[in-house]
């Protein structure tokens, strides 16, 4: 019987994606340290964790997973990469460990009846792209104004970058805009040709679906080819400090989705500073605490911890939860505004509540704008359009089940 | 038409930048017969050093004179590259005299990993900025002739000029000086070179140093364009087709190869890409190089590969 | 003293032509196989299987394939990742498009796809040599990266470009437990290694080596460079393709083209150089070095650092890991430029003389 | 040994290749100032290895001197680099030519002058080499790889002369050269020896020639010196005559009717 | 002279010229080789001797002229065809396969004769195995013959120069050639070893009945064992005939032998 709740932490602090991977990983670790220091664990259950460097590579990710999955008290995995998520999606059901892919992963895995072990909390690439189109439409003065317009998707040429395409095509049909697809070969340091093409086709808007260095490179190329930055919209993985910092003024006016809030004023961040950094136990540099991806890491870990707490409510307070029990907790999570405020997440996110059928739990996001020095939230919350999403998810998950010769979960299974 | 010109110019400029990295490969190969896999890592290392020192120097000295800071940073980074060259000679090359190409290649690979680790340990693995005052915004030429003008990047033009200058300098060095001749001798036969008193150790330090400085210049320019981050090592992969197209042993070949590859890949991506789904420039560059090789197996300007019984 | 061939007289060329002419070696190999097939399954944990043994076995097979091309035939190739990819996607397409296609034929067909691809990209080797060829083979790599990302047909029209297989079975036995996967891969490896060994010690192997060592002289004694090179490409890419299919089907079970990126190509080349060019054994050593070392470092560095009282950050560990890895490569090369296999044979030679120093 | 200045003193060296192959088993020899000393011996006796050990070119072959000492003008030289040795005037002409394939003949010769500064001297030296080997002059602009075997051998010798040495280690200089040229090469050796006081240590298979020009000789067999003596002594030794000069039993035998049995060599007994 | 019978012309070289850019390596050379004879080519360095051999076995393509082998005339051939017709060759600058053992090097000489295909070799079933053994046996004979038994499994790169030359000869012999082209097989050997080598060559000539074309700088050897000698100088033929004739030829003395011999 395990005595501690073990959080395996897959992360990458080296390689092309290190600038973005590092604050994220730091946030995840710091939150756990803080919970231990402040609360003495989850209802008295101490948290332990171990980090494993994946370098964003699928095979190393799988190795890390295999290494950490059989640790006593293992909780859940957040693979930090779509590629690793794909690989683990095959393995998790066998090992009975849930995967949390907050804001990434497989969009169809929102369907908990088909993907019992995947939890794309708070948003998927489909909700993200949907919201972005809504926002662009709004800026244009209404979605109907998009008719005849041209929107270019500059995307990371990987499953991550390709995911939004079906939804965008759907939206393009609906609103009559033209969708141009420009893939960028990973890791994305070479985009000259891409932006020459942008210049040639003169799209009205460009959507940036990048990660790691690809983002800052895109912004620099946009500047070099004179594409107006205020017509450039990024996904929430292209909207953090490392993406724009070294472009500085050159990225002014660039807008990106904000999946979560940030800054140091929220209570949870203050707690982290107090209980972790002031004791000299911070994982990273202090001035990075509260940055966009750092905060996202904190939120991810909070959701994990709360899922454990929720599971304990059912399976026994003060006990170490198994992967299966955590899965139930994740599936039955309900954090309303009040609870969020109490946890210190006021303004960082919206309430989330999951169910057997909906593993996402919330599909809200805002838009932020870079002013040359820092990010500012510049829009209200948007929610992805259920009407569009639902059928896509349904057909997608059906296809998945058919391919795998699996069957949908029975309603009764939801009780377990 | 204007767009074609733009693409062409863009390709030429990109080509010059590849050439700059390719130059590093050529130098070391030509002068010691080693295919230096670590060139990409050296570019990264140099750029990281440059970026961080230009950040730290003002802090240490308390000035905010950009020029001074950059100058000092350049000198310090240059010194770092010298140290790297010296250590590599001492710890690696010296012990591998007269070994086969594959072994040396592998050794440079070890060096690659080492430098990547070392660079990130010392300098961090975030994205850093090199601001050497390069103009970032585009200029538009011939606006009277073409609507919208022809877009040209001043930054690219400056970078291309620097690359061109370096190449001319190094070509002269190789063809005309005693040391240049000695370097070529070393590349042909380590042992024979030793036997007639060419000090391999010193030669290697010199060559790796020069390659280090070339890497520094390349790192500075690329870094100023793209930001300095681990992925900078991947520009080495873009430079490889340039190296073989121009010929592993030819300094001017690096430039010509660079221009051909640069233009070829940009034109193909822009004009061919859309029909096949895009993202073809990398393999197109390699296939282009391959096609040239079928006609000239030693590259356009490479020394003939000698096989004689 | 104990390791020598004295007293083991060969009475026929056949016995002298055995793979392991020395009795002690034969016993050692038999023991090793027994351990691999019987003892390991009794001891290994799930992690050991999935993260270490299975990758090791599959990578050994791939390295073996690469070694035939690079080590035996001297054609340096950086396209091995592509051959793996072609094998994997080839097998995948046969597997999903022909309902009821059994696993082993699918793997073999995948290997054949790779063979075809290998021969195609091997054609330039008839004109282009050495490093030029090495770089040129990257064309195959980048082309395959692109092809499997961009041509949807290959991924069975999957939206994300990621594909997966499941419920594998061989002759009615399911291959899903770690043990069954391991034994399956190991059995294939043994078969392939045996066939490969037969090839390299036979006439075709001598042709390959002759081409490697001096192609002009080889052609003077009647070896056709074209046949030798292309057959090396074919055999090697077949094996690599099989390994690729196994990597995808058995190890990853869900994959995207990035699984066979250029890094994979480089890794495979490193394996054969570090392990020993032109040595079947070397392929295994090399694969072990490249697969295991990072994992070992990753796990033991923090502990080691704690031992000497420094605490290194996770990033620090990763960086230190890179540095140590690089350092070890260089160190091994200095100790023995011809790879671990050579080191091994030298130590055997020492053992023969033992306990006398020379 | 005469009582002249000993410049090179090799003292009981052992050489091991690849950490396991013991090749030299305690070789000692001395070379005196201004002498021409020949090392004779069959294939694989260890002549080349001995020369490599002296000029410190063993490392590249993964060999190492494990015992004994080598002194040049009283200084231990085992740890000097080959380049240092060249500066001290010791240069080796390697067996098997080793010309720089991509360089032209003239460039090959000029690399020999790497350690020297004076342009005029180098030019004069180059002229001298061309005088010795007129054939090289006609091929001066050809890449070395495309010259004939003999031309390459001349080039290698010429290149060594370009370093302006005071001691030359010659490894099989006559190999592959036409008889006239062999004669020529040995005349050059004599010439440099008498006029410029260059000391020579040469490993040679052409025993006839070697003993004609050398003043002292060592005979090696499987890693050991089995016999040494002045050239005159060696020439008159019965065994040497039979095995190395091919004139056993009085007169020269025709290659056509060499016997197929071999007499056991006395010094191996 | 021995009792061996010299047969008809087996190899006829007609008006061969070879140029490399400006270098005239061979100019209008004609001579022939008779079956079973030992035919030497001599001449100063750079005269074009090696180039001549290269033309005969297809490494170089002569700019002009033709070669007739056993009545079949050709002016361009690749080395493979030459090998198939039964012309073997050793090299002046060792061209052994350095990474392979002595046995394997010599075995490559048998490759032309191997019938079993890739699959049979991979499985090493019946015929492939038997074939391998058969050739191995032949090669062992050569090894015995050349007295290099002790080095069977040594990688040739580690052998001393002289033994490498022997292996080179062995490899050529393994082809069971009708005509054997030897390029300075005795360079770098002492008298004793040269005697051995001569014995090998003579035995090959006698026992296997091979015709031999020999390039050699040691006049003693050439004069003793050859039946006829061609002399080249600067790419031109300046003499041809029995050893004695050639030795007395003024041109030859001036260009090559010098006066001391
Ligand atoms: N690099 C090497 N590795 C292993 N063994 C070697 C190496 N070089 C030489 N040997 C061995 O050392 C012994 C002596 O060789 P060495 O070349 O010194 O002979 P040598 O007297 O010069 O002969 P030759 O007259 O044929 O040139 C030989 O048995 C040879 O096999
Ligand atoms: N591939 C080539 N390219 C250019 N020149 C060549 C080539 N091969 C030979 N030569 C030239 O042709 C001439 C004849 O060379 P060859 O090798 O035939 O001489 P050789 O008679 O064998 O001399 P040696 O006795 O010195 O070996 C030489 O001057 C050589 O430089
Ligand atoms: Mg020797
Ligand atoms: Mg010749």
Image (cartoon, coloured by chain):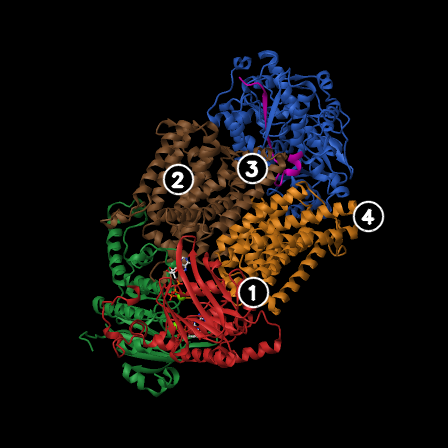
Residue on which the image places disc 4 = B63
- Helix, strand, or loop for circle 4? loop
Colour displayed for chain B in the image of the structure = orange
Instruction: Give the spatial CA distance, label 1 vs label 4.
Output: 48 Å
Q: Is residue E139 above or below residue C356?
A: below
* Comparing labels 2 and 1, the label whose residue is closer to the camera: 1
Q: Are marks 4 and 2 in one subunit?
A: no
Q: Is residue D244 above or below residue E245?
A: above
Q: Are marks 3 and 4 in one subunit?
A: no
From the viewer's perspective, tell me whether residue A250 is left or right of residue E101. right
Among the 4 quarters of the image, the one containing residue C98? top left
Residue on which the image places disc 2 = C109
Q: Which residues fall within the magenta stretch?
A: A1-22
Label 2 environment density (alpha carbons within 10 Å; few <14, some 14–19, many ≥20): many
* Comparing labels 4 and 2, the label whose residue is closer to the camera: 4
Label 4 environment density (alpha carbons within 10 Å; few <14, some 14–19, many ≥20): few
Residue C283 rendering spot, x and y as whole percentages: 43, 44
Colour displayed for chain E in the image of the structure = green
* Comparing labels 3 and 1, the label whose residue is closer to the camera: 1
Residue B223 rendering spot, x and y as whole percentages: 68, 48
- Helix, strand, or loop for circle 3? loop
Query: Which chain, by letter, is blue?
Result: A
Q: Are marks 1 and 4 in one subunit?
A: no
Residue on which the image places disc 3 = A57
Residue B26 rendering spot, x and y as whole percentages: 58, 58
Task: Work out whether residue A383 or residue D56 is closer to the camera in this orientation and state it.
Answer: D56
Asked if residue A189 can be seen in this view, the reply is no
Colour displayed for chain C in the image of the structure = brown
Residue on which the image places disc 1 = D84
**Label 3: chain letter:** A
């Amino acid at each position: 019987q395990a005595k501690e709740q073990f959080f395996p932490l897959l992360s990458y602090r080296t390689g092309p994606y290190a600038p973005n991977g590092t604050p994220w990983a730091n946030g995840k670790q710091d939150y756990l340290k803080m919970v231990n220091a402040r609360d003495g664990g989850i209802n008295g259950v101490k948290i332990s964790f171990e980090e494993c460097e994946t370098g964003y590579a699928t095979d190393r990710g799988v190795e890390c997973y295999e290494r950490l999955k059989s640790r006593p008290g293992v909780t859940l995995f957040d693979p930090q990469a779509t590629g690793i998520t794909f690989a683990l999606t095959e393995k998790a059901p066998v090992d009975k460990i849930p995967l949390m892919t907050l804001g990434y992963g497989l969009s169809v895995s929102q369907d908990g009846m088909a993907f019992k072990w995947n939890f794309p909390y708070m948003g998927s690439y489909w909700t993200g792209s949907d919201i972005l189109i809504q926002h662009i439409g709004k800026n244009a003065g209404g979605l109907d104004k998009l008719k005849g317009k041209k929107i270019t998707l500059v995307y990371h040429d990987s499953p991550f970058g390709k995911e939004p395409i079906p939804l965008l095509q759907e939206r393009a049909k609906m609103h009559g805009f033209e969708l141009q697809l420009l893939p960028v070969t990973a890791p994305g340091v070479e985009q000259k040709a891409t932006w020459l093409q942008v210049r040639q086709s003169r799209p009205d808007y460009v959507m940036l679906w990048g990660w790691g260095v690809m983002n800052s490179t895109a912004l620099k190329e946009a500047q070099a080819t004179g594409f107006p930055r205020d017509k450039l919209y990024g996904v929430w993985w292209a909207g953090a400090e490392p993406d724009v910092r070294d472009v500085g003024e050159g990225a002014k006016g660039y807008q990106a989705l904000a999946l979560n809030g940030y800054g140091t004023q929220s209570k949870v961040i203050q707690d982290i500073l107090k209980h972790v950094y002031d004791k000299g136990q911070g994982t990273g540099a202090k001035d990075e605490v509260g940055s966009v991806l750092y905060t996202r890491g904190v939120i991810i870990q909070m959701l994990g911890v709360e899922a454990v707490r929720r599971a304990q409510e059912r399976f026994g307070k003060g006990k170490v939860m198994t992967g299966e029990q955590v899965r139930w907790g994740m599936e039955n999570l309900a954090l309303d505004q009040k609870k969020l405020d109490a946890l210190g997440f006021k303004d960082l996110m919206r309430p989330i509540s999951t169910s057997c059928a909906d593993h996402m739990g919330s599909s809200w996001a805002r838009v932020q704008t870079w002013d040359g020095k820092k990010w500012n939230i510049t829009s209200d919350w948007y929610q992805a359009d259920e009407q569009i999403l639902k059928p896509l998810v349904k057909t997608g998950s059906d296809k998945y089940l058919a391919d795998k010769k699996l069957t949908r979960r029975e309603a009764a299974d939801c009780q377990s | 038409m204007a767009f074609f010109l733009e693409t062409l110019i863009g390709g030429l400029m990109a080509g010059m930048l590849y050439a700059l990295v390719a130059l590093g490969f050529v130098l070391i190969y030509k002068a010691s017969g080693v295919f230096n896999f670590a060139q990409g890592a050296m570019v990264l290392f140099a750029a990281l050093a440059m970026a961080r020192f230009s950040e730290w120097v003002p802090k240490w000295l308390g000035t905010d004179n950009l020029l001074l800071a950059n100058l000092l940073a350049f000198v310090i980074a240059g010194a770092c590259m010298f140290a790297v060259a010296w250590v590599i000679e001492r710890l690696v090359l010296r012990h591998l005299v007269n070994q086969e190409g594959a072994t040396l290649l592998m050794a440079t690979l070890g060096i690659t990993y080492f430098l990547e680790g070392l660079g990130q340990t010392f300098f961090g693995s975030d994205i850093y900025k090199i601001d050497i005052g390069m103009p970032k915004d585009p200029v538009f030429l011939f606006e009277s002739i073409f609507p919208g003008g022809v877009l040209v990047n001043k930054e690219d033009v400056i970078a291309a000029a620097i690359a061109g200058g370096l190449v001319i300098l190094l070509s002269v060095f190789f063809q005309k000086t005693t040391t240049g001749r000695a370097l070529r001798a070393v590349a042909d036969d380590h042992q024979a070179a030793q036997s007639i008193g060419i000090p391999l150790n010193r030669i290697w330090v010199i060559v790796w140093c020069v390659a280090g400085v070339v890497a520094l210049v390349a790192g500075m320019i690329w870094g100023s364009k793209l930001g300095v981050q681990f992925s900078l090592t991947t520009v080495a992969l873009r430079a490889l087709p340039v190296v073989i197209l121009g010929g592993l042993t030819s300094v001017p070949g690096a430039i010509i190869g660079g221009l051909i590859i640069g233009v070829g890949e940009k034109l193909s991506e822009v004009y061919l890409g859309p029909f096949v789904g895009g993202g073809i420039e990398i393999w197109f560059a390699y296939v282009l190089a391959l096609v040239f090789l079928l006609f000239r197996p030693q590259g356009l300007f490479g020394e003939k590969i000698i096989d004689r019984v | 003293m104990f390791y020598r061939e004295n007293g083991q007289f060969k009475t026929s060329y056949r016995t002298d032509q055995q793979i392991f002419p020395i009795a002690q070696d034969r016993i050692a190999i038999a023991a090793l196989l027994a351990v691999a097939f019987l003892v390991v399954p009794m001891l290994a944990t799930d992690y050991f299987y999935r993260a270490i043994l299975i990758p090791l076995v599959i990578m050994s097979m791939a390295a073996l394939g690469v070694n035939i091309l690079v080590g035996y035939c001297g054609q340096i190739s950086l396209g091995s990742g592509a051959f793996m990819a072609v094998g994997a996607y080839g097998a995948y397409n046969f597997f999903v498009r022909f309902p009821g296609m059994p696993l082993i034929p699918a793997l073999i067909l995948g290997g054949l796809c790779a063979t075809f691809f290998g021969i195609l990209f091997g054609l330039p080797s008839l004109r282009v040599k050495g490093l030029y060829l090495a770089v040129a083979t990257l064309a195959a790599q980048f082309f395959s990266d692109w092809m499997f990302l961009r041509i949807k047909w290959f991924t069975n029209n999957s939206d994300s470009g990621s594909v997966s297989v499941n419920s594998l079975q061989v002759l009615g036995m399911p291959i899903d437990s770690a043990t069954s996967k391991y034994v399956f891969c190991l059995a294939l490896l043994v078969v392939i290694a045996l066939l490969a060994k037969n090839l390299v010690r036979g006439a075709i192997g001598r042709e390959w080596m002759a081409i490697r060592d001096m192609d002009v002289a080889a052609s003077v004694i009647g070896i056709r460079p074209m046949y030798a090179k292309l057959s090396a490409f074919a055999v090697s890419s077949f094996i690599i393709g099989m390994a690729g299919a196994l990597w995808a089907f058995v190890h990853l079970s869900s994959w995207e083209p990035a699984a066979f990126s250029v890094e994979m190509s480089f890794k495979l080349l490193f394996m054969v150089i570090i392990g020993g060019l032109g040595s079947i054994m070397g392929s295994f050593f090399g694969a072990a070095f490249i697969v295991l070392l990072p994992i070992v470092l990753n796990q033991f560095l923090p502990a080691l650092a704690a031992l000497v009282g420094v605490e290194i950050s996770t990033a620090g560990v990763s960086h230190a890991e890179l540095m140590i890895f690089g350092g070890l490569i260089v160190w091994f090369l200095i100790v023995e430029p011809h790879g671990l296999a050579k080191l091994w044979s030298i130590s055997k030679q020492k053992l023969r003389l033992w306990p006398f120093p020379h | 040994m005469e009582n002249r200045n000993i410049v090179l003193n090799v003292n009981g060296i052992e050489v091991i290749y690849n950490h396991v192959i013991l090749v030299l088993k305690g070789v000692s020899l001395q070379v005196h100032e201004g002498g021409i000393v020949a090392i004779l011996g069959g294939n694989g006796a260890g002549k080349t290895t001995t020369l490599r050990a002296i000029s410190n070119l063993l490392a590249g072959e993964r060999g190492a001197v494990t015992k004994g000492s080598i002194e040049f003008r009283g200084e231990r030289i085992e740890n000097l680099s080959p380049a240092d040795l060249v500066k001290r005037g010791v240069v080796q002409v390697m067996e098997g030519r080793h010309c720089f394939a991509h360089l032209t003949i003239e460039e090959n010769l000029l690399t020999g002058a790497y350690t020297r500064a004076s342009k005029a001297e180098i030019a004069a030296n180059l002229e001298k080499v061309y005088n010795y080997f007129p054939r090289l002059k006609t091929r001066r602009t050809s890449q070395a790889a495309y010259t004939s075997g003999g031309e390459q051998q001349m080039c290698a010798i010429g290149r060594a002369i370009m370093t302006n040495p005071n001691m030359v280690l010659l490894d099989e200089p006559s190999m592959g050269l036409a008889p006239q040229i062999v004669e020529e090469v040995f005349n050059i050796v004599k010439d440099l020896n008498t006029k410029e006081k260059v000391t020579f240590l040469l490993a040679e298979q052409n025993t006839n020639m070697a003993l004609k020009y050398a003043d002292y000789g060592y005979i090696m067999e499987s890693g050991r010196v089995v016999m040494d003596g002045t050239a005159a002594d060696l020439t008159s030794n019965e065994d040497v005559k039979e095995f190395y000069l091919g004139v056993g039993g009085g007169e020269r035998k025709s290659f056509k009717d060499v016997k197929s049995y071999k007499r056991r060599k006395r010094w191996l007994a | 002279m021995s009792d061996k019978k010299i047969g008809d012309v087996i190899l006829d070289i007609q008006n061969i010229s070879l140029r490399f850019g400006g270098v005239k390596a061979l100019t209008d050379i004609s001579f022939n080789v008779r079956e079973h004879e030992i035919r030497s080519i001599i001449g100063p360095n750079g005269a074009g001797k090696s180039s001549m051999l290269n033309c005969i076995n297809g490494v170089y393509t002569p700019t002009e002229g033709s070669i007739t082998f056993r009545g079949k005339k050709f002016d361009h051939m690749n080395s493979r065809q030459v090998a198939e017709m039964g012309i073997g060759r050793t090299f002046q600058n060792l061209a052994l396969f350095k990474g392979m053992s002595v046995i394997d090097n010599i075995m490559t000489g048998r490759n032309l004769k191997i019938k079993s295909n890739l699959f049979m070799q991979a499985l090493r079933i019946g015929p492939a195995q038997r074939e391998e053994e058969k050739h191995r046996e032949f090669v062992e004979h050569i090894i015995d013959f050349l007295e290099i038994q002790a080095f069977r499994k040594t990688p040739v790169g580690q052998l001393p120069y002289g033994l490498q030359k022997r292996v080179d000869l062995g490899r050529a012999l393994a082809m069971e050639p009708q005509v054997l082209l030897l390029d300075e097989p005795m360079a770098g050997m002492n008298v004793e070893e040269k005697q051995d080598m001569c014995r090998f060559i003579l035995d090959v000539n006698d026992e296997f009945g091979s015709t031999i074309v020999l390039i050699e700088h040691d006049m003693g050897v050439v004069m003793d064992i050859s039946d006829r000698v061609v002399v080249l100088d600067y790419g031109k033929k300046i003499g041809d005939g029995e050893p004695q004739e050639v030795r007395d030829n003024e041109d030859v003395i001036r260009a090559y032998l010098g006066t001391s011999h």
